[in-house]
Image (tube, rainbow, N blue to C red):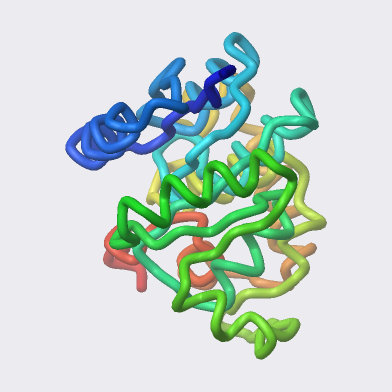
Amino acid sequence: MKRITVLLAEDHMIVREGFRKMLELEGDFEIVAEAPNGRQAVALARKFHPDVVLMDIAMPLLNGLEATRQVLKALPVTKVIMLSAHSDDAYVKNATESGAVGFLLKQTSAHDVCRAIREVQKGKTFFSPSISRRQDRIHPLSPDRDGGFSKKAAVLTSREMEVLQLIAEGKANKETADELGIGIKTVEKHREHIMQKLDIHDTAGLTRYAISAGIIENSVQLTIV
């Protein structure tokens, strides 16, 4: 029987090890690679072509939402299951709009994690039971001046999503430029475009937006909030 190949993308090593050991107990899974950040997740997915990616929603360098978009652009047949400690409707909606076919809370049982991988591999969707029970109540969310979740997130380019994440993580323009290998003026132009597209015109608002959309975790909050 062909085993289901899995890529684990999770920045917390202890969590990643827990998932790996749990899946290794099953006979039909093969862990082909592990990634501690979104950029490595994309690179390793392109290298190993996994059947399924377990993708943490908030990771350094590149968040799981944008990493999912890039993985699926390169590998349309790969299935992505998003992992999060939060079950907010905004997180779930943003994950599915990024292309994820599953959404699991990190406290989900081992049984449900294994079941989720098998189900999405068959072409189905799978959500943690507590999320699944309220799926029929999920509705489009409206933007607010504080940077609440909006479908407008989908209009940002991949580069703009990367810049937005680094802004929300408190990186200065020079740090962002060095991180992405682009010029400072290019960063400033991306920043200007992001603010125009989201109709948010200060760093604090962009940070709150990034948190509400699941681009960075609630714990990554700076003194600007």
The single residue placed furthest to the left in the displayed view is 14
Residue 89, given in percent of the width and then of the height, sits at 56, 78
Camera-nearest residue between 224 and 77? 77
The single residue placed furthest to the bottom in the displayed view is 137
Residue 167 versus residue 76 in the image, above or below: below
Can residue 21 be seen by looking at this rendering?
yes
Can residue 206 be seen by looking at this rendering?
no
- Tell me the quarter of the picture where residue 108 sits: bottom left
Q: Residue at x 51, y 55 (%)?
A: 215
Residue 182 versus residue 128 in the image, above or below: above
What is the total number of numbered labels drawn onto the structure image? 0
- Tell me the quarter of the picture where residue 217 sits: bottom left
The single residue placed furthest to the front in the displayed view is 1
Residue 190, given in percent of the width and then of the height, sits at 71, 44
Residue 137, given in percent of the width and then of the height, sits at 66, 90
Q: Residue at x 36, y 73 (%)?
A: 225
- Tell me the quarter of the picture where residue 195 sits: bottom right
Image quadrant holding the N terminus, namely top right
Camera-nearest residue between 6 and 119? 119
Left or right side of 126 for 110? left
Residue 142, given in percent of the width and then of the height, sits at 72, 85
Q: Residue at x 45, y 73 (%)?
A: 87
Q: Residue at x 62, y 27 (%)?
A: 51
Camera-nearest residue between 66 and 188? 66
